[in-house]
Amino acid sequence: MHKPGDVILGGLFEVHYTSVFPELTFTSEPNEHICQGFDPPGFRHAMTMAFAIEEINKNPNLLPNVTLGYSLYDNCGTLVIGFSAALSLASSQEERFLPLEQCSGGPPVLGIVGDSFSTFSIATSDVIGLFRLPIVSYFATCSCLSDRHRFPSFFRTIPSDTFQVHAMIQILKHFGWTWAGLLVSDDDYGLHVAQSFQSELTQSGLGCLAYIEILPWGNNPSELTRIVEGMKKSTARVVIVFAHQINMIQLMEEVVKQNVTGLQWIASEAWSSAAVLQTPRFMPYLGGTLGVAIRRGEILGLRDFLLRTKPGNSRNDERYMIRQFWEHTFQCKFAPPPVDWLEAGGALCSGEEDLETVQTEFLDVSNLRPEYNIYKAVYALAYALDDMLQCQPGRGPFSSHSCASMQKLEAWQVLYYLEKVNFTIPFGDQVSFDENGDALPIYDIMNWLWLPDGGIQVLNVGVVKKTAFGDEELTLNEDKIFWNFNNNQPPRSVCSETCNPGTRMARKKGQPVCCFDCVPCSEGKISNETNSLECFSCPEDFWSSPKRDHCILKTTDFLSYHEPLGVCLTTASLLGTCICTVVLGIFTYHRSTPMVRANNSELSFLILVSLKLCFLCSLLFIGQPRLWTCQLRHAAFGISFVLCVSCILVKTMVVLAVFKASKPGGGVHLKWFGAVQQRGTVFALTCIQAAICTVWIVTASPVPHKNTQYHNDKIIYECVVGSTVGFTVLLGYIGLLAIISFLLAFLGRNLPDNFNEAKLITFSMLIFCAVWVAFVPAYINSPGKYADAVEVFAILASSFGLLMALFGPKCYVILLRPERNTKKAIMCRGAAKC
């Protein structure tokens, strides 16, 4: 179809489905072929370009004084025919075109709208690019066509498959479908998509493909049977199909044959609006299909233009194509009809039939999608020409700031302006191209609704577009979506169920990353998100909850005043302190009696005070350890016990010296054990322990420590001694004094019965040494707070032993046997004498 003009725009459309090439003979022409299967929508595509050019020619503000013409070709769904037509347009050698008389040659073809197939566009653009002739496709989506080095003159008004793939992934992400199958056509369109989709899906980490199958061309039932059987066996409930209508028709025939239901289909733009698939036979399987579709637009006046399409209104070069359309629409033949047609009772066409009386896709302008892209493509070329012709001489973009002239227009000049075109069409959409020749990407989201009465409706339920920041933005109206499943709810398509918080994903060997087992986190580790790849350790003071989904503060454990053990020890400590106080009061009250005076009352008072300190120092071991309590507890314990034991040692030595002095020549011993010497000895021995404690605290001070060695979920607060040597020397010094006291007292065990203080000291030291000898292994083997409890018990036990052994008999005599609290009773040597 041709129309003359000052400038010609070419067009490549699929008006017929296929073509038949007869067997070549010596007399046949090499380019002879027969196109078959008239396609009304394809013819509408071609007429949309004719309408756009007519509208531009009537617009006084766009290309004034310039008339656009067109030269439209039918590729018959065959690459060689489309390629031949593109070469004819590029070389401007169409024989049936009659140039204007005033021109020296035919008007140039400065741009081509088409082709619809990616494979056709690749082949055409490879050659057309050599001529720098702009080609603007309205339906070729292969991402490979964005390669500007290979296709420098290719543009398109439809988004590339790269964006379509991203749109599909956004839909999968929105509904949580991580397990899907992918079917693609066996051509550049499908194969590039398969590679791109798998790569993008893997990089995004949003899902996996259960299978990838290539749909065969032509009649291959065995391959289709194998593919459908695989779909039937797969656990994936979502099937994504990047293929053409003819591929889907063949596939659905096999799906119906095997009765494969329960699948959620996601359609590419190539078939998301295909009426040929929206039949009662296929809808039980395809109902609820979601698909991305070319942006729908409105073209005012197009239907009126299409209604004017009649054989009588057309030029000779258009009449042949329009007559085919007429015969297809009204099922008639123009004269002279074939003989077999008349014999079969076929009707004759008059050319005056009314298009509005028949139901034809040709007049359906309610869902203009490819037509809208064709409309934008024609306007893009027109605006590029308009910008080029408005160039002011001396300010042009070409050499020496020159401009293009109407008399010498070159295709490469149009290409320059087409790259920079930016305009808004009457429908309101902006049209421009990026550095790869791609238009601003936007898709409608379509949903196939199967009505209860058997009717079929394709609804627009959302949109996906690229934002100003380069991200994909998906908007869906889920309330409008029809799902072909029970309760009208979206299906669930996952290889493995979601791993809840508290578990991590463990990939199944030999399977995609979406197939995994959920392994519970180990103790001390948590995961607080679904599908966590790994479990994370809790901070030092925290532990995992029972469900392993969050960290909780570890329980702290120490010898507390609030627990039964702590209460018992505290009570015992206070009781011992009170007893010491009572005994001290008794001795103070009876300080003038022989029993108190005979036992060196000053040392007795000092022992009682030191025992009181020993009882009280045990309280430092109870409660949460702090730095000052850790430093003070062992120092107070060590000094208090050394003070007590040193007093006992001096007392033992005084007792022995007194009885030695009672013998002839023994008076010399007493001068070394006067009151001053006794005090000095106690002070010196105690200062040694104080020095040991000072050096220990200064060099390696005991400090509080959070111990998790015994229980992972519990913090044991304890005091580490800092220096084991210091602690050993402290205990060893106490033990040394206790052993010396025990030995000296043991030597004096045979003194007179009624004044045998040495026996009491021997017994008390025996208790003291026994307690502390048992303490060492018990302390070493007791964990955490029980080590403190053992030490407190040892302090209390040894203190009570000393208190009872040394002062119990004296208090008994003072309080209950006062008749024995006399100097005579104390000094007598024999029971009979007394």
Image: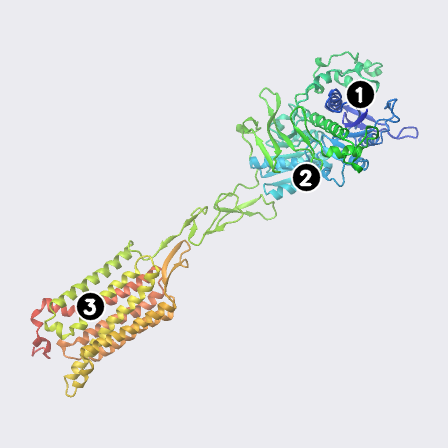
The residue lying toward the viewer, choosing from 185 and 623, is 623
Which of pointers 1 and 3 lies earlier in the amino acid sequence? 1
Binning the other alpha carbons within 10 Å of mark 1 as few (below 14), some (14 to 19) or many (20 upward) gives some
Q: Which amino acid does label 2 sit on?
A: Ala
Which label lies toward us, 2 or 3? Answer: 3
Quadrant for residue 612, please give it: bottom left
Residue, disc 1: 321
Q: Which quarter of the image is occupied by the C terminus?
A: bottom left
Q: Which colour scheme is used?
A: rainbow
Residue, disc 3: 608
Residue, disc 2: 194
The residue lying toward the viewer, choosing from 261 and 248, is 248
Please say if 451 is above or below 142: above
Which of pointers 1 and 2 lies earlier in the amino acid sequence? 2
Which of pointers 2 and 3 lies earlier in the amino acid sequence? 2
Percent x, y of residue 437: 71, 35
Q: How far is the residue under mark 1 from the one under mark 2?
A: 37 Å
What residue is shown at x 13% (from left), y 67% (from top)?
588
Q: Which amino acid does label 3 sit on?
A: Leu
Q: Which amino acid does label 1 sit on?
A: Met
The residue lying toward the viewer, choosing from 831 and 448, is 448
